[in-house]
Amino acid sequence: MAAALTDKNGLPEERLFVVPTAEELARAAAGRIWGIVRERAAVLPRCGKTVPRVRVALSGGETPRRTYEILSAEPYRSRFPWELVHFYQVDERWVPPEDPRSNRRMLHEALLSRAPVPADRFHSVDTGLSGPEEGARRYEETLRAAFPDPPGGFPRFDAILLGIGRDGHTASLFPGAPLEEGSAWFMATAAAGDPPVRRVTLTLPAINAAAQAIFLASGKEKARALHRVLSGDPVLPASRVFPVRGKLTFLADADAASMTLSKGGIKR
Ligand code: 6PG
């Protein structure tokens, strides 16, 4: 099922797609990333870019794990233009990379160790630095080298894959905490979430500068948060994601969408 959430000037700007199961959700997400990358890879040489590249930011947590595994396997594995795609982290928990809570570790297990991603195409947060502030500053340098002088002052990722927490957080932007820090693209946050650790994250304006933001929501425990986000509850950081010159897509399984669908759909 698909629903256009808003329709400004006759053009749908947000879309919700609901599929029956978590496995179908992962397949839909992999297909969507593949579609965006393929389209960008086809267009870039015509834009006169000497070194074409597609830039994608990936979330951690558990929901996208299966999506990454699917992308790493056939039929995508041998068709995906791995050489062209640069992967970045949406956020990271400030733990060593071998820690089970590390997003980098999850990305490694599900994608980087399985797919032929060249080592210099994955740009990881270095949690071996002195602390989250230094880590955020250094990662922002990495991003600024990849997006020199972007129009509007923020990086335009081709796609950002996001999750939703039960409390309505996204990336490592939590309710009640700052969502931005001046003109910063990446910032350190206080300890939050489950597990409650310090984190580093893309800022809200950096997320909202993307060409495409795609949310994944799976399971009954996400139903209330997804419903509140789709209702536009401004308290929730995930509700504040709205790419200013891009597209916003919500992919949900039936359990995650259950409250939205039973309450008669979408309000914003
Ligand atoms: C993180 C994430 C975070 C995640 C949500 C959902 O590091 O925690 O990147 O924003 O997407 O917490 O997490 P789950 O997919 O594990 O439910």
Image (tube, rainbow, N blue to C red):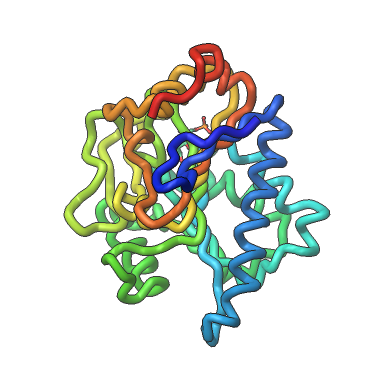
Kindly give the residue lying farthest to the front in the view shown: 10
Q: Position of residue 39 (x, y in %)?
A: 63, 65
| Count of residue discs | 0
Asked if one can make out residue 47 in the rendered structure from this viewpoint, the answer is: yes
Q: Is residue 170 left or right of residue 56?
A: left
* Vertical placement of residue 207 versus 168, above or below: below
Give whichever of 45, 22 is nearer the camera. 45
Of the pair 59 and 52, the residue shown nearer to us: 52
Q: Quadrant of residue 255?
A: top right
Image quarter where the C terminus lies is top left
Residue 195 screen position, x and y as percent: 42, 29
Q: Is residue 90 left or right of residue 19?
A: left
Q: Residue at x 40, y 41 (%)?
A: 171
Q: Is residue 74 above or below residue 100?
A: below
Say which residue appears at 43% left-offset and 37% top-offset. Answer: 6
Q: Nearer the viewer, residue 77 or 233?
A: 233
